[in-house]
Image: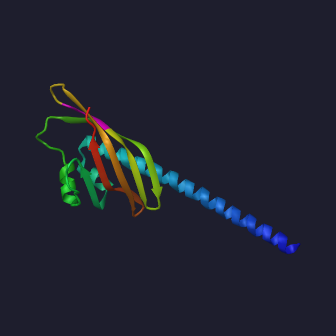
Amino acid sequence: MKSKHSLTRIIQILVGILLINNLTYADNTETDKAAIEAQAKAFSTAFVAGDIDKIMAIYSPNAKIIYGNNPIEDNISRIRAYWTPNKKSEWKLQWHKTNSEELLISGDLASDVGYYSGLSKHPSGKESQFRGTYVIVWKKVNGIWRMHLDMWSSIKS
């Protein structure tokens, strides 16, 4: 009878450990999801402000971008140049946002698939809306979620 009681107790302890691990994993996933969403929002805010340093701080040190019909860009200096605002342009970005349709997290990597949109305005009052699709692979670097692979494509209006 004692061995049956011991076995039951061991099973109860193992089930308890599994439940705690699952709750911890769920908490980590929610924490990671919130951190990624905050980074995506910070990117949009920095993009609108033309703050290239904040934009680049969201990318991993060995990030890649893929857009349009261009080759993969993996040179961090050229990625910086891509996002640096054109001082000659009279158009001013008014807003930008992303809408994640699916965010999957596994360890230190996450995939984020969704839509982006924004609005630019010219001093003449003319406005230009834009929108498209994106796929971002996020990578946790030193505890911070960074864009590691950033791909996007515009949707024709």
Q: Position of residue 91 (x, y in %)?
A: 17, 35
Segment colored magenta: 117-121
Q: Position of residue 105 (x, y in %)?
A: 46, 55
Residue farthest to the bottom, as pictured: 3
- Side of 16 relative to 44 (left or right): right
| Residue occupying image coordinates x 38% and y 56% | 138
| Residue occupying image coordinates x 33% and y 40% | 116
Placement of the N terminus among the 4 image quadrants: bottom right
- Give the vertical position of 92 relative to 18 (above or below): above
Residue 93 versus residue 21: which sits nearer the camera?
21
Q: Is residue 129 visible?
A: yes
Placement of the C terminus among the 4 image quadrants: top left
The quadrant where residue 61 appears? bottom left
Q: Position of residue 62 (x, y in %)?
A: 28, 63
- Side of 86 relative to 137 (left or right): left
Q: Is residue 150 magenta?
A: no
Q: Is residue 53 visible?
A: no
The quadrant where residue 89 appears? top left
The quadrant where residue 8 appears? bottom right
- Give the vertical position of 123 relative to 83 (above or below): above
Residue 147 versus residue 101: which sits nearer the camera?
101
How many numbered marks, from 0 up?
Answer: 0
- Give the vertical position of 72 relative to 5 (above or below): above
- Give the vertical position of 47 relative to 142 (above or below): above
Residue farthest to the right, as pictured: 1
Residue farthest to the left, as pictured: 88
| Residue occupying image coordinates x 81% and y 72% | 6
